[in-house]
Image (tube, grey):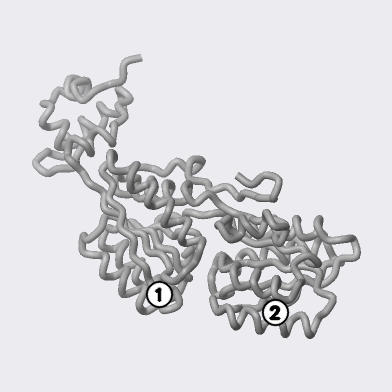
Amino acid sequence: MVRPTVHDIARHAGVSLATVDRVLNARPGVRKQTVARVEEAIRAIGYVRDQGAANLARRRVYRFAFLLPDGQSRFVGTILSALEEARESQLTDRVMLEVCHVPVHDPHALAATLVALGAGKVDGVAVMAPESPQVRDAVARLRRGGTPVVALVADQPQSDRDHFVGIDNDAAGRTAARLMGRFLPPSGGPVLVVASSIRARDSLERRFGFDSLIGTEFPAVHCLPTLEAHDDPQRMAAILQNAFAARSDIVGVYSLSTGNGALIDALREKGRLARLVVIAHELTPLTRAALLAGELDAIITQNTGHLVRSAIRVLQARCDGREILASQERIRIEIILRENLP
């Protein structure tokens, strides 16, 4: 079947090609009655615009900024690698990607960076950061100025963001609980839960999901309060030492956040890894090595390449006024064991 063209629209509506072009690109100079006639012709003949071809004809270039936490996070490193791959492959689609490293624990600095991206400096923003009043206000300001914003990895549901690109973190927490309950003996026991910061929405939602399933299906497993290390290796070592001194019967550890290096180092130093069930998030070179060594039992992860590509597609769709294909942008929860390491 031959796809309808702009020539078919012009013939059906009884107008010139120039008029069709003005209507399709929302340019002024066309009477309302004529616009209505062209739009009716589009519906009648089933015309679907090739947005990629239209952008190429207009030499449209998309400029997208990715705001990522600064520091030495290995998970952020995997996102940077995925961005580099996307930067190379997206050039033919006229997409330019910029990375801004921001102090994620300083909401004022993060908000200032977001605001500075307004006024047409970029066409869209993807932000990976904890939700805060300052960030919510900055996102709302960008949106009022016509700049689409997506939340990446950690959602910003109370903000005016366009879309969330990431896994269902409540479901990820319940997945971790299922694994922990199955891996532990029927007698259960106390499980230590650690995080960089429980202020991060992804960590908070994972904790809620973990508790909800453990409490209903594995009553012999007792979840201890979340301990926060704030990305400080010395603090991680200290809180683990205190936790095991207070509870020598701990049988498992669940790491909510992506900073697993300090956790693994501290547990390894104390010689406890072989006696515990340890479940963590995100596949990085460090967690891969720990899984191969038998120091981690399972990793719950998400494909960072899919994350980056999805964020780009969503921002492009918003720029073009197109609907998002929800099934394409759904990020899957992946369970990695030593036996199925990619």
Q: Residue at x 29, y 31 (%)?
A: 50
Q: Which residue is mark 2?
A: 240
The image shows residue 328, relative to residue 150, as above or below, that is above
Q: Quadrant of residue 299?
A: bottom right
Q: Residue at x 31, y 53 (%)?
A: 97
> In the picture provided, is 203 more to the left or to the right than 77?
right
> In the picture provided, is 22 more to the left or to the right than 42?
left
> In the picture provided, is 310 more to the left or to the right than 7?
right
Q: Secondary structure at mark 2?
A: helix
Q: Secondary structure at mark 1?
A: loop
Q: Residue at x 35, y 73 (%)?
A: 111
Considering the image in quadrants, where does the C terminus appear?
Answer: top right
- For the residue marked with disc 1, what is the amino acid? Pro
Number of the label disc, if any, that sits on residue 303:
none
Considering the image in quadrants, where does the N terminus appear?
Answer: top left
Q: Which residue is mark 1?
A: 103
The image shows residue 264, relative to residue 311, as above or below, that is below
> In the picture provided, is 93 more to the left or to the right than 246?
left
Q: Quadrant of residue 188?
A: bottom right
Q: Residue at x 78, y 65 (%)?
A: 274
- For the residue marked with disc 2, what is the amino acid? Leu
How far apart are the alpha carbons under marks 2 and 1?
Answer: 26 Å
